[in-house]
Amino acid sequence: MKLKSTNRNNKIFSFKHGLFSPLAPDGGLFMPLEIPRLSSSFFKSIAKKSLKDIARETSELWFPKIPKQDINRIIEKSLTFDAPLVFLNETLAV
């Protein structure tokens, strides 16, 4: 994954650089050059997926060079909490 700064600097950074640097050199945040697209089938079945399943599927798109077993280990160690949906109205939840 290649990154750029939100300050619109044209310099391109590696994922590793962005991972270990809190901010881009120009003070902006790191942003991917391209945002992976999730399929319509992902969204159609999202209500049936667990938080960890959603994290796995999205992480595999965002970080294809990280081995799946490493992604699974990171998710198992980091998502140790509930994230319930709170409905704001009949059709909108956060």
Image: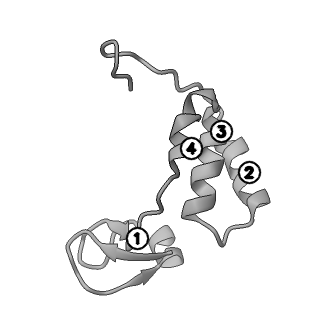
Q: Which residue is mark 1?
A: 34
Foreground tag (2 vs 4): 4
Q: Position of residue 42 (x, y in %)?
A: 56, 44
**Residue in the image at 30% along x and 79% along y:** 25
The quadrant where residue 70 appears: bottom right
Q: Tell me which numbered mark, 1 or 2, is placed earlier along the sequence.
A: 1
Instruction: State left or right for residue 89 relative to residue 81.
Output: left
Q: Please name whichever residue, 8 or 34, is drawn nearer the observer in this view of the structure.
A: 34
Display coloring: one colour
- Percent coordinates x, y for residue 66 in the rendering: 68, 68
For label 4, the SS is: helix
Q: Which badge, 3 or 4, is on the more N-terminal residue?
A: 4
Tags 2 and 4 touching, CB below 8 Å? no
- Residue 51 is situated, as x and y percent measured from the top left of the image, at 60, 34
Task: Look at 30% across and 13% down and name the residue there.
Answer: 89
The residue singled out by tag 2 in the image is 72
Total number of numbered labels? 4
Mark 1–mark 4 CB contact (< 8 Å): no
Quadrant of res 26? bottom left
Task: Residue under label 4, please give it.
Answer: 41
Element marked by disc 3: helix
Residue bearing mark 3:
52
- Please tell me which of labels 1 and 4 falls first in the chain: 1
CB within 8 Å, label 2 to label 3: no
Asked whether the residues under the numbered discs 1 and 2 touch, taking CB atoms below 8 Å apart as contact, a structural biologist would say: no
Residue type indicated by callout 2: Asn
